[in-house]
Amino acid sequence: MPGSPAPAMTSQSFDSLSAYLGSRVTLQHDGSTEVVIPGADRLSDADGHLSELAILCAIDIATGMGSVAATDPPMVTLTADMAVNLLARPAPGDLRTVGRVVKPGKRIIMTEAVVTDSTGSPVAFATVSCAPVKEIPRGFAGRIQPGDTRVLDLPEWASVPIEQQYDTTPVEVAGSGPVPVASIELTPRTANPFGFLHGAVGAHLLLSGARRAGLAQVDSITVRYLRPTVEGPADVIVDDVFRSHPSTALSMSLRDRGTGKIACAAHVVGPSAQFATR
């Protein structure tokens, strides 16, 4: 009804990360999706900038919801690949992301998203491929109609700062094998509604690993989601390094230590310390 408050949704309607970020999701009548994440101290660094995890999650929601709206009947979709260009650190305040479908398809839906900060300046641009996997059950709580807005209920643990919730410090590995540059446990707080590692958490883990591997900043990241992380911990391994002044490119993989399988392959590009610009 006009003027009535937006209905709240539980974290089970989307996922724990989206709820923790306080996401407000609107499905527009033109099929695009707007995601607003309010600026908050618990989500920001010491300078007041929202975490990159918030940017990646907003992209994931906006393109995922847009891909669902493009299917008939509505289908659950999963992210197949994500290419993100990081333009600037967001100014303190709310983060706004708009996702839209570029080309619908039965097997792959091409989408894009633009992220802007509280000043209206663009901070990231992404293209995302989504794959429809199964029909959404009628009456599913997460299914919304054009014009609807949903505000996700904050979980009980929302007061804990994001750097503590999503600590990517490498988990100690026993035995031989590649040494991870970043790791994270698979828990209800890092999982999507299917119990797999959240796609945005995986991409954030790769960014954290890239910085530990020597990049002063990340300009772009491309992630191919090959299979889900079902056991964990998730480990980031640097497979190869390519240097060409002033950029460095890392070929990386995200591996499910519990199964020993590669879950994601990624390329991350940015300058090393002496060439950083942001």
Image: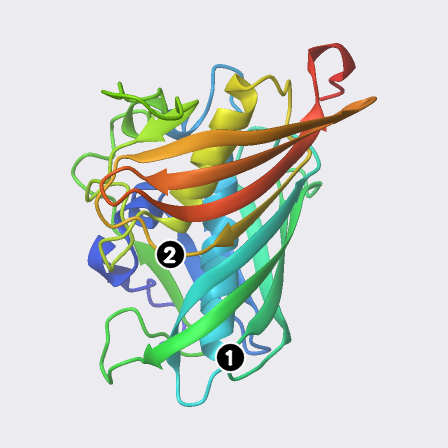
Determine the residue located farthest toward the left in the rendered image: 156
Q: Amino acid at mark 2?
A: Arg
Quadrant of the snapshot with the N terminus: bottom left
206 relative position to 163: left or right: right
Q: CA distance from mark 1 to mark 2?
A: 16 Å
| Horizontal and vertical percent position of residue 115 | 62, 48
Occupied quadrant, residue 220: top right
- Which is nearer the eye, 62 or 2? 62
The local crowd at label 2, few if under 14, some if 14 to 19, many if 20 or more residues have their Cα within 10 Å, is: some
When the figure is inspected, residue 141 is found, relative to residue 97, above or below; the finding is: below
When the figure is inspected, residue 37 is found, relative to residue 134, above or below; the finding is: above
Q: Please report whichever mark, 1 or 2, sits nearer to the chain's N-terminal start.
A: 1
| Horizontal and vertical percent position of residue 210 | 55, 26
Q: Amino acid at mark 1?
A: Arg
Label number found at residue 227: 2
93 relative position to 235: left or right: right
- Which is nearer the eye, 96 or 273? 273
x 24%, y 82%: residue:
137
Secondary element type, mark 2: loop
Determine the residue located farthest toward the right in the rendered image: 245
| Horizontal and vertical percent position of residue 128 | 58, 60
73 relative position to 218: left or right: left
Determine the residue located farthest toward the bottom in the rendered image: 73
Quadrant of the snapshot with the C terminus: top right
Label number found at residue 107: 1
x 51%, y 22%: residue:
48
